[in-house]
Amino acid sequence: MKVSLNWVKQFTDIDVSNEELIKTIGEQLGAVEEVFNMTPVYKDVLIAEVVECDKHPNADKLSLCLIDDGGVNQSVNRNEDGLIQVVCGANNVKKGIKVAWLPPGSTVPSSFHGDPFVLEARELRGKMSNGMIASMKELAIGDEHDGILIIDVESSAGQKFADVYQLNDTIIDIENKMFTHRPDCFGQLGVAREIAGITNNKFVSPDWYLNPLDNLNKSENNLSLKIINDIPDLVPRFVCVPIANVNIAQSPVIIQSFLYRVGIKPINNIVDITNYIMALTGQPLHAYDYDKLSAATEAEGAVLTARHGNGKESVNLLNGKTITPRESDIVIATDKEIVGIGGVMGGTNTQVDADTKNIVIECANFDMYAIRKTSMALGLFTDAVTRFNKGQSALQNETVLLEAMSMIVGVASGDVSGEIQNANGEVSLPSTIEVDAAFISDRLGVDILPEDVKRLLTNVEFEVQLDGAIAKISVPFWRTDIEIREDIVEEIGRLMGFHSIPKTLPMRDTTPVKKDRLLSLKSLIRNIFSSSGGNELLTYSFVHGKLLQDCGQDPIHAYKLGNALSPDLQYYRLSLTPSVLDKVYGNIRAGYDDFMLYEIGKTHIKNHADEESLPKEQQRLSSVVVSTSTDEPAYYLAQKQLMNLLEKLGIKGASLQKIGNFNSNESLNQLIAPFDTQRSAIVILGDEILGVIGEFTSKTKKALKLPDGVAGFELSTTKLLNANKFSAYTPLSKFPSVHQDISFDVPEAMTFGELDSYIRDNLPDDEDISWQLSPLDIYKAENKKHMSFRITISHNQKTLTSEEVQTMLDKIAEDANSALDVTKI
């Protein structure tokens, strides 16, 4: 955002040096990116009058001029009448006009910051030329270079050109991001108000801004105009007025000059006025050629409609591009064709040009999010977009339009040819906030008196009424960022200067905070998996829709991002397992045969939201085991990791059961989707489903190029937390442990998990006894299965004998024979 200090000074006094002001702006308003002092650029440029102008005797396209500089320049050669001879090639030079003269020894302003071009007195076609008469382009205040600049204001020969056009200026470029929440600061008027506030001066907006008067005379011949607003929720303000008999020409030099200073290219007086008002107030406007608009309308007169695109219409834009707006984009159209993209850019079919006689001025307000999406989708970035996507106030439109009308009538001799028409939606009025001075003091850490609150805020045109220590604050309509008491606290701190607040450490209670149990659990899981050879992953919470489909999940159940950072990050993930599986193939290609990957993270799914209908996080843990160099099935390696985890967490009683035995919900369905239901199991603890363990579907393995030796599990970290009691450390038994193997012949239909769970449930439940159960072998024989386990048992008080352990196992085998129809071998 470029700020002209001379423009700002039209609205407020600045009684500090530029250096101090720039420092204050950086501390209290926004980061200053660049400062450009214009004074040295124009220090030698003088106003001169062309006294005589004759054709050059040796060149058809040159003129030989005698100019009067009031005798100011003492080093130039003059004739006996004190006049200076200059050769000029412009076709608009003539006797009697005043011009900008660059004397010998001066630097052409347009070359000042590049390769400086210093003028000298030299012959042109046999005639001496002392310096040059400059064009707008050479003076670096416009793009016009076909003719010289003709001074269009009262001035006298010998005056400094910079004094006449306020070019002894300083341009301050403030980072746009600093004003993201301050749409009013995208206009010189808003910045002037803030500069007054941070320099402790009272600011008063011009009357036309605070108290607009519709006092312009209306023409007797009205131009027929009808406006329609089909989307008032996205276009809360849609205001237009027709103006007839405009005289299209160059803008006054001062207007062009101020536009050029803030980075806007002058076009013609009508377009320049709309841009001037935008640069002043932050409110973009657009001018249409009324006659072109009428020709593009089937009905009599002209029609302007704010509506959605239909995805089939195209429009040629002012930047030369032809685009087809999407169905979600805001377009401005007649009753038969599009004439512009609302809040972004107008079309060439209604642009104002040299032949324009009648115009329509539009001053609208658009939804900031809709403008931002349209701009990003269509690749259109304009000054209007920069302002609209910050959320301009919808309460200033008619005020701004009246000032634009006044300027057009004065500069372009237009006649207002109809009433101001509006097709407006609903707009929220500014807030009224009550805040106690003590509330502000407590949060800033410095004593603030109610009188100070009133003074600081009224300096920037808040209305403040004090009732003791309570301030009742009416927020001005342009401050769309002020909604709650804390916003007032921030505003007070900024206006007084955060740097002026004493750097005193606040009082804090040194009592240790209570440990976060979830963080402790995650740390414990990391330690357990790391000691088992696991490698932790940290992947994005967002995934591509194809990854979900490759893993059997349905993207329709995932939250889709409206403005994804990357095409590969479209959806919130439904579970962690696809993210982990996506990293397996890369590790295999890197030469790793046996490894374990795991991730602790969050997932989201539709229809799982909090009380405010916001996506609710599901805390998950996923692990994948890859084994391609051994014959041991990956499933049992994954199961070993799972059981080791549960044991180290002190979670007892977990079992594995068939997937088909449970009433599923969509969250569970999407969790199970990557797993082969015939080779997987549900992890159960009491009545709770902890998660799922198993091998993966052939579709998933093929899509992600997974080897056969891969299996994994995914658990709910929240449910693990509820089951884990974080018991105190229990030292290992001083007595040796005993290992015993036990084998069973089981029915063919029985799963390993059923027998495993039964044995675990029937092992001794004694605080002094520790045990560990691990699978040894499983194979299928004729009409039955053979399953073997190893049990490791230790006692904290004594050494167990083999006979004692065998007695325990015999009891388990006897009970299993009765309950499950299995036979101990």
Image (cartoon, grey):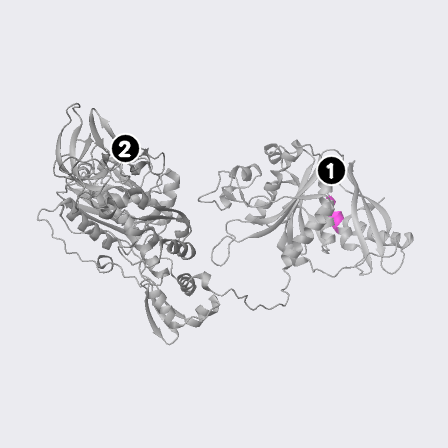
**SS at badge 2:** loop
Q: Residues within 10 Å of mark 1 (few under 14, many from 20)?
A: some
Disc 1: which residue: 633
Q: Count the marks.
A: 2
Residue 475 at what x, y percent from top left? 33, 63
Type of secondary structure dominating the magenta stretch: helix
In terms of sequence position, does the residue under pointer 2 or pointer 1 come before the other?
A: 2
Residue 752 on the magenta span:
yes
Q: CA distance from mark 2 to mark 1?
A: 91 Å
**SS at badge 1:** loop
Which is more toward the observer, 211 or 148?
A: 148
Q: Residues within 10 Å of mark 2 (few under 14, many from 20)?
A: some
Which is more toward the observer, 700 or 603?
A: 603
Image position of 812 with respect to 497: above or below:
above
- The quadrant in which the C terminus is found is top right
| Residue situated furthest bottom in the rendering | 468
State which mark lies toward you, 2 or 1: 2
Residue 399 on the magenta span:
no
The residue depicted at 66 percent of the width and 55 percent of the height is 521
The residue depicted at 35 percent of the width and 52 percent of the height is 391
Which numbered tag is attached to residue 120?
2
Which is more toward the observer, 135 or 352?
A: 135
Residue 578 at what x, y percent from top left? 59, 41
Which is more toward the observer, 515 or 121?
A: 121
Residue 390 at what x, y percent from top left? 37, 50
Q: Amino acid at mark 1?
A: Pro
Q: Amino acid at mark 2?
A: Glu
| Residue situated furthest left in the rendering | 220
**Which contiguous range is marked in magenta?**
750-757
The residue depicted at 70 percent of the width and 47 percent of the height is 529
